Amino acid sequence: MSLYVQKFGGTSLATAERIHRAARRAIRTKLEGHRVVLVVSAMGHTTNDLIELARATCSHPPKRELDMLLTTGEQVSIALAAMAIHAAGHEAISLTAAQLGLVTDSAHTRARIQRISRDRIDRELAADKIVIVAGFQGIDVGGEITTLGRGASDTTATALAAVLAAEVCEVYTDVDGVYTADPWIVPQARKIDRISYDVMMEMAAVGATVMHSRAIEFGKKFNVPIHVRNSLTDAKGTMIMAEEPGMEQISVEGVTLKEDLATISLNAVPNTPGIAGRIFAEVARNHVLVDDIVQNVYDGGKYANLGFSTNAGDVLEARAVCERIAADLGIGSVEIDEGVAKVSVIGLGMRTHAGIASTMFDALARAQINIENISTSEIVISCIVRQEDAPRALRFVHDAFELDKTDGADNIQACAPKEGSEASPTPS
Ligand code: ADP
Ligand code: ASP
Ligand code: MG
């Protein structure tokens, strides 16, 4: 008998009616002859509300207590989902991470899954129950409650799907699937039918919040197809799956926006060997996430300005750490800019096609938007812009690559093949 993991996000559980809808979906899948594990997030905006409440109570809440608080959101959802299934005359059981044995490391608010025990889930499935698991949470070896990072119920779902060798992990959300850009910001964005794990992982990492990027790692490693779809319709969504030959032809698959960023600049850093290593070792030791790093050397190589971007949520900690380092290492000053955002283009075809960077920069120039920093990786080009310009930047870049028009075949005409590339430039 095949197994389905079905994950429902906050909006898809925002009311009792929606919880009933999710329950009906799970029951239908079970009646079709599958075993079902349901993974749920906290209802609606519960997690945000709880964070606000924590901050209103304590300006710098201890992360252990934050995890204790935030995990209550998912606990409400599992209980209500189980009740909804019982109300419909079927058997279900709700389980917290501690009850099922989802063990993480001890990094509160950003813990990583270390192992998942199958025993309890297998027993409940064997008793013909729908098993409902609280997403986003874990337990460390010392019995402490942890969370896996914002949006990480997706990761609970794909990790469970991997461990249980599920046929598919269905991720039910408030849009029809993965689009070429966030459809609420770019109304012309087009739904993508199939996308590779690699591209989706990159898109998620640079702002496509429709999936948590670590969730894709599990899908890829254990080859579990992930079906992102709308919880309110039966329409097919987007399949996230292993790369197929046709996928390589697409130069740019999507564009993303990351708004919750801040940049930290360390000015007048003595330019001597080992300084960057010491700075970033200290930053990492304090669990501050580092996004892009830029360094410019000046004054004949005597000094450097060293900057990095980080999540806005980490900015208080980042500032404190950097000010400490600055005092220790004789660094001139530390500056924080919380008004930045990052616009990125992502596509596998970038490996073989040139001209993508210039198309992006040209689009931003036409929009009269200044680029504050540029970074690139194998299949991503990112520009830092002012936050107030960011949604417009996204629309201009989406438009420049004509992502609304392509039907998944290619947008390659705009971009010449790189020299020596084996890819055919223009499919007929
Ligand atoms: P859930 O609560 O179901 O987990 P999320 O808010 O985490 O939902 O993810 C769905 C949201 O992701 C969409 O409403 C949309 O605003 C956002 N999003 C960002 N980028 C994309 C994209 N490329 N395609 C689809 N949705 C996207
Ligand atoms: N409730 C958690 C959050 O809002 C986890 C999730 O929704 O995936 O981040
Ligand atoms: Mg989500």
Image (spheres, rainbow, N blue to C red):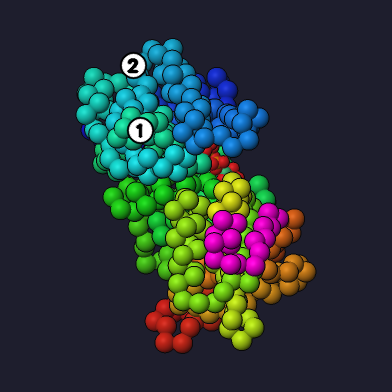
Bounds of the magenta span? 323-347
Residue 410 versus residue 133: which sits nearer the camera? 133
Q: Label 2 sits on what residue type?
A: Glu
Which residue is painted at 48% across and 21% down in the image? 76
Q: Is residue 244 magenta?
A: no
- Is the residue marked by circle 1 packed among few (<14), some (14-19), or many (20+) residues within 10 Å? many
Tell me the quarter of the image containing the N terminus: top left
Which residue is painted at 34% across and 19% down in the image? 93
Which residue is painted at 23% across and 19% down in the image? 127
Q: Badge 2 is on which residue?
A: 91
Q: CA distance from mark 2 to mark 1?
A: 26 Å
For residue 245, which quarter of the picture? bottom left
Circle 2 SS class? loop
Q: Badge 1 is on which residue?
A: 139
Mark 1 CB near ligand 2 (8 Å cut): no
- Residue 371: x percent and y percent? 69, 69
Residue 181 versus residue 284: which sits nearer the camera? 284
Circle 1 SS class? strand
For residue 358, which quarter of the picture? bottom right
